[in-house]
Amino acid sequence: MTQEFKKIMPRQNKQKSRYVAELKNTRDSLNKSKKLLLAINRAQSEFIADVSTRTLFDNLLNDLLLITASEYGFIGEVLYTDKGNPYLKTHAITNIAWNRETREFYEQNAPHGMEFSNLKTLFGRVLTTGKPVIANSPASDPRAGGIPDGHPPLKAFLGIPFSIGDTLIGLVGIANCPNGYDEEILEFLSPLLVTCARIFDSYRQEQKRLKTEEDLRKKEDLHREAQSIAHIGHWELNLHTNELVWSDEQYNIFGIDREKCKVSSYETFLDIVHPDDRALVDGTYRDSVKNKKKYDIIHRIGTRESGVKYLHERWRTEYDETGAPIRSIGTTQDITPLKETEIEKGKIEQQLRQTQKMEAIGTLASGIAHDFNNLLNAIVGFADLLLMDLQEGSRQHKDAQQIKNAGKRATELVQQILTFSRRSEQKWQPLKLQQVIKEALKLLRSSLPTTVEIRQDIHPDCSSVIADFTQIHQVIMNLCTNAFHAIGQKKGILEVRLDEISVDPKLAGQIQDLSAGKYIRLIVKDSGQGMDQVTRERIFDPYFTTKKKGSGTGLGLATVLGIVKSHKGAITVHSKKGQGSTFTLYFPVATDDNTPVQKSEVQTELPWLGARVLFVDDIEFNVLLGKNVLERLGCNTLGVTSSIEALALFRKDPDKFDIIITDQTMPALTGYELAQKILKIRPKMPIIILTGHSDSLDNQKAKKIGIYNLLMKPLDMNKLVESMCKLLM
């Protein structure tokens, strides 16, 4: 037993020693890898942070020496002479100066990069071949070209190139690792070399960009200098004789035939300057002569009738030995296209600001409309409940009906707000325009002063048109409001006429976008100030307005035109200065005049559904309304004001409910998001979503996840009952 033990022990000790050695090697390898990753991360972070190039590469070299246990080294960029010979320019190099001379050389050149072009060296071999060089016995290596006297000993050398694609861009050289270098260290350092290559490439691109910008700046400076002295148009004024001499190009710029009209004096020049700029030009010139200043001004020539040019004038004045002015010489440049571009840019920027303002107003209007819908949902809903409970024909029943009627009118106003903010779909249907006009004029009468007389001539038998109520209402309001502004504070007449006409081919040929056929004609006429031809031609342009700054958006008539065109109609305007304006609109008659008939308001007898309902809405009074309605349908209803709580209840017992009714706009989870999560738990769960409006949810999107009922607020009880019956069948 003892003999056997003696045989086993040495073998176990040997295995243990080998295991310890392997463990140590693994630990050392991990530490080296960790240091490598830290070096790469630091280099990338410093590059992103825009640390100076020298600091970045100095840190990178120090990390490289530490990882490889090397004594000294360099990181350099490969450049080429005019003859195509490669040389090395360092971005980081270890200070190995061995005497005063080499120390001074290092201090003077290292910050800007040292250049080495001796190719008969170990690093030169890397430059010429583009391949790594490993030399663990440099003294006897035929590739080495020797080292200067006093140079620290070179015991081992590793030179590694790095490239972008096939292009050699840099080189790393390290020396004197105690254990020498091998192929394994090359593979180990490859990620760091990739980082070096990318940083070098980015550095080169940045240098190229900076050089391009510098070249461009120099060209721009040269161009500006050339413009300041070039004879684009030049002139000379003798201050003793007041004789003005122009070059041929100067006459061309001013649009004057020198044979017919010679500009011979300072005064004749001033006469050509735009009347509004004349005092500025004269004052600036006289000030420049008196105070010996250079003259640099932009002014206009011509008049509004003959056209306007923008000129950039520069000049200087010469003086005699006593300081008295002798003559002025200058140049003139026509900058009309540039100035017009600036003016147009200003208009576009103003339009952008106006558009952003309108968008902000639209967003605000949408939010207000959403809150109103929640209030109206309760008002109309509880009015419906009262109507079912009260005896029809009683005073209380009539009062409740008035509450509901007012709620419905408020709902229509909310829809107008949503249309304004582009958050409501258009509702195209057969529509009697006489109903819309009377309602709009009733609203206008309360807002217009009594000095404006409104005359109506509305034919009651006009056919229907296919139209959107809200948009037609907006057209009438915009036209009548414009008419009021045209009348102003004086007494005036606003006429609105509606009739049905047949447009023959002759009339159709005279009016753009009009075809022969039957039309409903709407005429809005005012006795205001009227318009000239220039204004008439621009009134439908977006942002064009004749009102004072801040008094109009310039979108009213542009909106009218857009709506009329979307209804396949046409519009004309007749106006003369001082004679008022007449707008005539043509809307095609509906081919199938089936104006919808209003359904009965509320069912007096509701079906008994007996369903188990989970009702979700973040507004408490909406939950109360929902429970009251559903209880009248015989439903066992659980109402909650949190979509998170509703999801938790459903997860706890998915079969507890027969149907879920949820609001769309809620904190935490929207109705759509809640429905998605519920349908993942119980795929065919019947769900109804209620919404006042939603940009993000429509019937098509809802159907994709299995929601087939999307009802609008304020809630219509008949539609709710109809939807529930379909889902519970």
Image: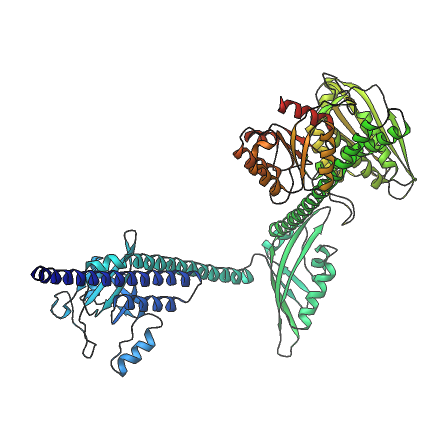
Camera-side residue of 219 and 20: 20
- Quarter location, residue 406: top right
Residue 69: percent from the left, percent from the top?
A: 25, 69
Residue 220: percent from the left, percent from the top?
A: 50, 60
In the picture provided, is 700 more to the left or to the right than 448? Answer: left
Camera-side residue of 179 and 416: 179
Can I make out residue 578 in this image? yes
Point out the residue furthest to the front here. 1
Q: Residue at x 23, y 59 (%)?
A: 186
Point out the residue furthest to the bottom here. 100
Residue 243: percent from the left, percent from the top?
A: 67, 63
- Quarter location, residue 479: top right
* Colouring rule applied to residues: rainbow
In the picture provided, is 582 more to the left or to the right than 121? Answer: right
Camera-side residue of 442 and 633: 633
Question: Where 58 falls versus 654 (above or below)?
Answer: below
Quadrant containing the C terminus is top right
Camera-side residue of 537 and 255: 537
Can I make out residue 539 in this image? no
Residue 674: percent from the left, percent from the top?
A: 59, 38
Quadrant containing the N terminus is bottom left
Question: Where 712 falls versus 550 (above or below)?
Answer: above
Q: Residue at x 73, y 37 (%)?
A: 624
Total marks shown come to 0
In the picture provided, is 422 more to the left or to the right than 56? Answer: right
Point out the residue furthest to the top here. 592
- Quarter location, residue 656: top right
